[in-house]
Image (cartoon, rainbow, N blue to C red):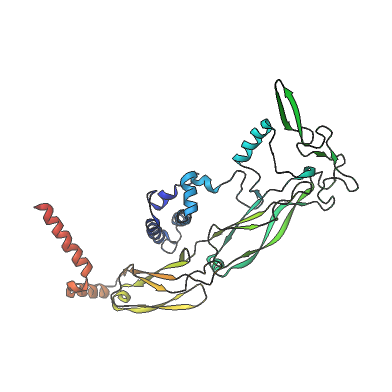
Amino acid sequence: MAKADYYETLGVARTADDKDLKSAFRKLAMKFHPDKNPDDSEAERKFKEINEAYETLKDPQKRAAYDRYGHAAFEHGGMGNGAGAGFGGGGFSDIFEDIFGEMMGGGRGRQRSSGGRERGADLRYNMEISLEESFTGKTAQIRVPTSITCDVCSGSGAKPGTQPKACSTCQGSGRVRAAQGFFSIERTCPTCHGRGTIIPDPCTKCHGQGRVTEERSLSVNIPAGIEDGTRIRLQGEGEAGARGGPAGDLYIFLSVKPHEFFQRDGADLYCAVPISMTTAALGGTFDVATLDGTKSRVSVPEGTQAGKQFRLKSKGMPVLRSSQTGDLYIQIQIETPQKLTKRQRELLQEFEQISSKENNPESTGFFARMKDFFDTLSD
């Protein structure tokens, strides 16, 4: 199933600025948040799509790539969804060079060094962490199935006591030249496949490849404050090179799971807190838990309206590799009473009867302006 357009997911135009993106994201995040839609798998799916779209479009570089290439900007030929999927080792430019390079005598094929050694492919590993782990940082142990250097032949591919030999067809160059009329065409040697060497007596363990498949355990350091979509490179921890060639790299792609209470925007956190109608009208206090393991008390003044924000300084996310910390913003939602008793209904009706315009200035002013507008249309 094709992914939906990120702009359509957020309901904004492609020309939307950062302010429009942020506003649309917050509105939709509030609407589809799992807390407001318990046991609703469709709302949960929508919430994840909204987060994914906003995380891409709020980043100028990611957005530029998406505007140009769409979802393909974050995909790669041969790139899988799990550990062990090849990440490097070619793309369109490699194919272009291989085709035209052979015609011009300069094709490179796979990255090879002397003696037929080949650099190992880069690998990708997807890791999901919680927002709490992103806040504190962690050292994670992962297991990666990959190719490692054969311990029997030490990566040469040849049986112990023997050595690879120069290819007799290409004399060790890895390429052969053939004349066709006025032209001389150079191509990859069909005998050694461009390696320049052949192995008459291959290693019995790796069958001449110089590497074997094995699962390795690696330690990955995840720094505090790391964001969703960050890529961590582990140099030399990718696939082992063929016949003693250098190893590729391992790329850890991090994703942060949606949190039950908090939404992240850069280093800042946002938390929607529902309060009763009476607390909003009369004022009060409540406590909120923060990711640093403490509680913060929020004082609600008398007459607080829905949408009011309270800022808790330095209670957000740590800024990666710095001493700075973002803020936590508490967004007030006023809950309308439900399932009223007869007495409660009587009290609310009595309150409505004795209310004045001063009690509800916004609604009074709105309907007054609406009446003036309607009168203007009627004239």
**Hey, which residue is sitting farthest left in the picture?**
379
Identity of the residue furthest to the front in this view = 182
> Residue 147: horizontal and vertical position, in percent?
74, 51
Residue 8 % position (x, y): 40, 48
Which corner quadrant of the image does residue 194 belong to?
Answer: top right
Residue extending furthest toward the top: 181
Residue 179 found in image quarter: top right
Q: Position of residue 298 (x, y in %)?
A: 39, 77
Left or right relative to 349: residue 330: right
> From the viewer's perspective, is residue 177 above or below residue 27?
above
Q: Is residue 241 visible?
A: yes
Q: Looking at the image, which is closer to me, 237 or 189?
A: 189
Report x, y in % for residue 262: 46, 66
Residue at 56% across / 47% down in the picture?
A: 75
Q: Is residue 212 left or right of residue 30?
A: right
> Which residue sits at x=83%, y=36%?
167
Total labels drawn: 0
| 307 w.r.t. 183: above or below | below
Residue 261 visible to the viewer = no
In the image: residue 293, left or right of residue 172:
left
